[in-house]
Image (cartoon, helix red, strand yellow):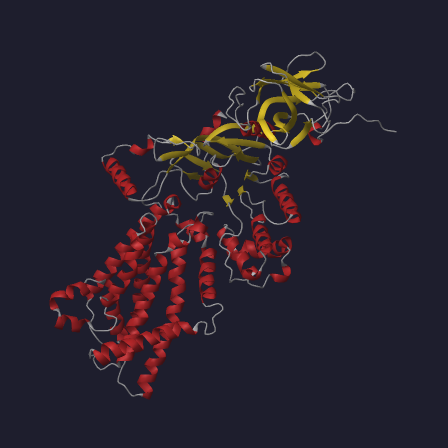
Amino acid sequence: MSKDLILRVENISKQYRLGTVGTGTLADDLTRWWHLVRGKEDPFLKIGDTNKRDTKGSSDYVWSLKDINFDVYKGDVIGIIGKNGAGKSTLLKILSRVTTPTTGSIKSNGRIASLLEVGTGFHPELTGRENVFLNGAILGMTKKEITSKLDEIIEFSGCERYIDTPTKRYSSGMTVRLAFAVAAFLEPDILIVDEVLAVGDAEFQKKAIGKMKDISSGDNGRTVLFVSHNMAAVKSLCSTGILLNNGEVLCKGEIDEVLQQYQLLNVSNAIDLNNFNRKGNGLCRVTDIAIISQDDDIKKTTFKLGEKISIKLQLNNLANQAIENLRVVIGVYNLNDEGYLRFDTKTTSSIIKISEDKESYITCTLEEHLNIKPDQYSINIAIFQGDDLVDYVNNVSRFEIENYDYYNTGQSIQDSELSKVFYKHTWH
Amino acid sequence: MANNNNIDWKFEISPKRSLFEFNFKEIWNYRDLLILFVKRDIVTIYKQTILGPLWYLIQPLFTSVIFTIIFNGVANIETDGIPPFLYNLAGITAWNYFKDCLLATSDTFKGNQHIFGKVYFPRVILPLSIVLSNLIKFAIQLLVFITFYIYYCFFKGVDISPNNLVFLFPVLVIIMGFLSLGLGMMISSMVTKYRDLVFLLQFGVQLLMYLSLVAYPLSLIQEKLPQLSWLIEYNPMAQIIEASRYLLLNTGSISLGWMLYTVTFTFVVFILGLLIFNRTEKRFIDTI
């Protein structure tokens, strides 16, 4: 690779103490000091749990980040993604020198500027112009740099008319616009950006993303580390990505791969269908779901784009008698919980009943082709009797649709990620 | 990637903290920020008040009047032929500078955590800017003092004159600045973890004022409570205020020995404060 290495993150870990600062802190401080005085290692570094926010841990110390390693090359635009509490912000704080790591080191060959928040240090009593200078200086610009860019900054913010009015008279949107404008004209070697695009109205967001793209593209594009929950923005801005989970790097590499891994994280582990402790009155329970290809009548988890399928439910009758008047709803969702397909016995006025036998089957046969976007999907099922919920399961039976030559052109569909549904069509 | 190990890195972030690691070049690079902070403090403090900077004058004048009534009117403290009002005003002007700097600098980390938590710049810029912006307030108050000085001198015919060494007065101001900066940085660092100090400081400053000769001469305490006079003599602020009055009003006493003590004390406090501050600034955001 001919690119220059500009930033290296080595074995970065960060430990935090939970709970409030109190006498326990003083006691720990004294213990720590006593160990250091005798030239021993800090005893609290050996303990600590990984940072899982939802489970009870055994000690007051957690590792918010654990052994993070990665290299950044000049011109890279890296998206850092992960769930809440994965350690993204802690990593950015360490990179931007707001706090230090507990262990490890970060080496860089350029000036790092961070945008963890727009408008840091804005004073409401100062005018827009004065705040531009103050905020710019806080972000590391010199007065000369700001003066030379002042006109551009004001123009980009769109607050020209208000520029000599105290910012306390601004609408919150205007403050944010002005603040982002200052940040957008920062010119460090490495720029660290945290969620700042989630501000302003739609027009301004578009402008902001456009500006970010300008910054990061071109021959001497800036190196950018970008943290966001906005997957569309990450996907359009970043070339590579790092996925954090519970303070550890889960995967890094091409942005598409990393985003896919992230989507998998969002799916909670498959629900055990034999565990009946779930919603509904339990007259009957779904015990198995099979998605079957109509081509070969085989249960599968991967289907070709345009394949015809049936969904077969196995039900366990717990009422010891025939159950009538059932309504069954099957929903197909992608991994971001966006609904794609919905099959409801009510809409087709189908009458569903199951016999008193212990096992019954209900099959939903699709008459159309499965012509939705190649992606991962999962199924939700709800069964009602009248107004009563009988059984409900969600996020089960994950399956994948893969790109295929649905249009019979001799190759699979190009740019398939840009369309949600595929219709066979002709041109004249 | 194997050959990447011998790259010369320009910057490094690591948990290792050297005690004497000061990046003066970095502070110099941020000088514009220092100036802007000073400007912000001055411009914004009396925004949307009618009297504006006049409050700079009203506050010491009223305090001085009250002190004159209590200490000189009621308690009958002798001020060695100097008009008591002027005598008190000199003490209060000097004390106010020290007090304002100390209180503001000791709030550095706690009061600015929203900025410090979001962006990096050399933290020491903030307490520096406080000491500098208070200097301007001090200058205005000094001007008031000079106005009354002239008034008493020419219109009341009181026989007062500055000492020949009055040109050394700025040195006293600088010592006060460094002393409050050093103490403030120390307290500010400790407050990040244990808030107890906030309460201690609140009444500590009150008490210190009475131990700092603001409204009475050192000779008085030596005469009336000789067993406790050491408490005041060892207080560097008492030495500074006594010395200011010696330079400005030619009253009281000054000794080279005690001045050397004050300078040494200030130097030690300042260096210690800088060390503690430097140590704290890197990770205080985790504990505050």
Residue that sits furthest to the right in the current view = A428
Residue A112: % across, % down: 50, 43
Identify the residue at horizontal 50%, vertical 44% (top origin): A114
Identify the residue at horizontal 74%, vertical 22% (top origin): A369
Q: A245 and B264: which one is in front?
A: A245
Q: A406 and B63: which one is in front?
A: A406
Residue that sits furthest to the front in the current view = A321
Image mark count: 0
Residue A424: % across, % down: 79, 25
- Identify whether B153 is placed above or below B256: below
Identify the residue at horizontal 60%, vertical 61% (top origin): A163
Residue A87: % across, % down: 46, 36
Query: In the picture, residue A366 is in which quadrant?
Result: top right
Residue A101: % across, % down: 40, 37
**Res. B188 visible in picture:** yes
Query: In the picture, residue A148 is in which quadrant?
Result: bottom right
Q: A208 and B267: which one is in front?
A: A208
Left/right of residue A64 with respect to residue A169 in the rendered view: left
Q: B147 and A365: which one is in front?
A: A365
Residue that sits furthest to the left in the current view = B227
**Res. A1 visible in picture:** no
Left/right of residue A211 with respect to residue B280 in the rendered view: right
